[in-house]
Amino acid sequence: MAGRRGALIVLEGVDRAGKSTQAGRLVAALSAAGRRAELLRFPERSTEIGKLLSSYLEKKSEVEDHSVHLLFSANRWEQVPLIKEKLSQGVTLVVDRYAFSGVAFTGAKELRLADAARRGEFGQERYEDRAFQERALHCFQQLMGDETVNWKIVDASKSIEDVHEEILALSEDAIRAAAQRPLGELWK
């Protein structure tokens, strides 16, 4: 198994779809099964750029739309060396949001949105309103037509355990497939 690269598993979707819950459960399950797995979240709020984004998302500051898009992109770029290093070391990275959220959310300025809105803390951050999330969902659906990305759709309205089991099975397949391929360029 030495020398095999890790998989990059990205959980994307509208706000309050359960991405963070499932990402944490997936890392725990993979680790318990003896796989090297780590969690990344975007935006990565601990960096200087991430702190600016956090303030913006929490509605504590204003940033011009084009500038905020570039900040989200820069926040991902500053993590690329770490991502490549971990993947080349055989670590599977489970990522809570990545570049596709940036595209969908910028384009927007299969969980039903009513289900997401009922979940705790919906509406506390800048983009958590129903109309915006509907536009973001439409953008995600358009992105799914990109054949260079291996999209798997999971119905997030099922129970947490059922969603976890489905994501775990899909992830095991992705990890086996990634081990057979060289590390390519990242979508940023």
Image (tube, rainbow, N blue to C red):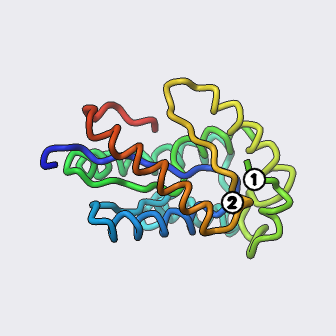
Pick whichever, 37 or 176, lies toward us: 176
Secondary structure beneath disc 1?
Answer: loop
- Residue at image position (46%, 38%) is 188
With 118 as the anchor, is 7 left or right in this view? Answer: left
Mark-to-mark CA distance, 2 and 1? 7 Å
Residue extending furthest toward the bottom: 120
Indicate the position of residue 14 as horizontal and vertical percent values. Answer: 70, 53
Asked whether the residues under the numbered discs 2 and 1 touch, taking CB atoms below 8 Å apart as contact, a structural biologist would say yes
Q: Is residue 153 above or below residue 115?
A: above
Pick whichever, 12 or 174, lies toward us: 174
- Residue at image position (37%, 63%) is 30
Label 2 crowding class (10 Å Cα cut-off): few <14, some 14-19, many 20+?
many
Identify residue for label 1. 111
Indicate the position of residue 65 as horizontal and vertical percent values. Answer: 68, 44
Q: How many marks can you see?
A: 2
Identify residue for label 2. 17
Q: Is residue 84 above or below residue 141?
A: below
With 41 as the anchor, is 31 left or right in this view? Answer: left
With 62 as the anchor, is 47 left or right in this view? Answer: left
- Residue at image position (74%, 75%) is 120
- Residue at image position (43%, 62%) is 48
Quadrant for residue 47, please give it.
Answer: bottom left
Indicate the position of residue 9 as horizontal and vertical percent values. Answer: 44, 49
Residue extending furthest toward the left: 2
Q: Amino acid at mark 1?
A: Leu
Q: Is residue 138 above or below residue 91?
A: above
